[in-house]
Amino acid sequence: MPAQGAITEADKTWIEEWENVSDITNFIIRLDARGDERPEQVKGPRTFKVTSEERILTQDRIVDDKNDPFLNGCFRPVTVPDSVDVKTNPNALSDADIQRIIRASKVAWDEYISIVDSPATLRRMLAQFDQMLEEGEDLSAQRLRQLQARLQEVAPRARVIQKDRAEYEKLGTQ
């Protein structure tokens, strides 16, 4: 990921709020009172606050975008600057964004479903879809199937294939 550019005064003071929606342990860079960097572990479902500067510093140190928790859907935006939106960060969707996408036109739906590639975000979309159905909304079964297929595409389930079945069965008889 290219460097975000110069840090502005607004970046140093703007407090962003994010929620960890992943089971994966991630790290962010915090700045202490002296301005020294220190890593902080973000583990388990919780909400945390960072300055825009800390987020930018963290993102600048991540080599591959797919490992950036702010972009890959591990962190869900709660309160963020206007520069962080669905267009700039398709995997960091708020619940309201997800509901808008689910209700969107066919063209918009097809575009969104093709760019969202985070298993965590797609699972959240499925949960929102279920919640909207429970609330009585009339939603397309085709969209549900597309969503499930997209999740299977980006996070296929691992299958263990036992090649030596006969040998395995012999072990149990001894």
Image (cartoon, grey):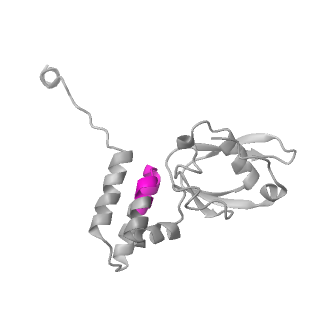
x and y, in percent, of residue 166 in the image? 12, 22
| Residue 91 sits inside the magenta stretch | no
| Residue 123 sits inside the magenta stretch | yes
Indicate the quadrant where residue 165 lies.
top left
x and y, in percent, of residue 152 in the image? 33, 49
x and y, in percent, of residue 82 in the image? 67, 65
Q: Quadrant of the C terminus?
A: top left
Q: Horizontal placement of 162 versus 59: left or right?
A: left
Closer-to-camera residue (22/132) = 132
Residue segment shown in magenta: 112-125
Above/below status of 103 relative to 112: below
Dominant SS type (magenta): helix
Q: Horizontal placement of 110 versus 78: left or right?
A: left
The structure residue drawn at horizontal position 46% and vertical position 70%, both measured from the top left corner, is 99
Closer-to-camera residue (131/91) = 91
The structure residue drawn at horizontal position 32% and vertical position 56%, both measured from the top left corner, is 148
Indicate the quadrant where residue 51 lies.
bottom right
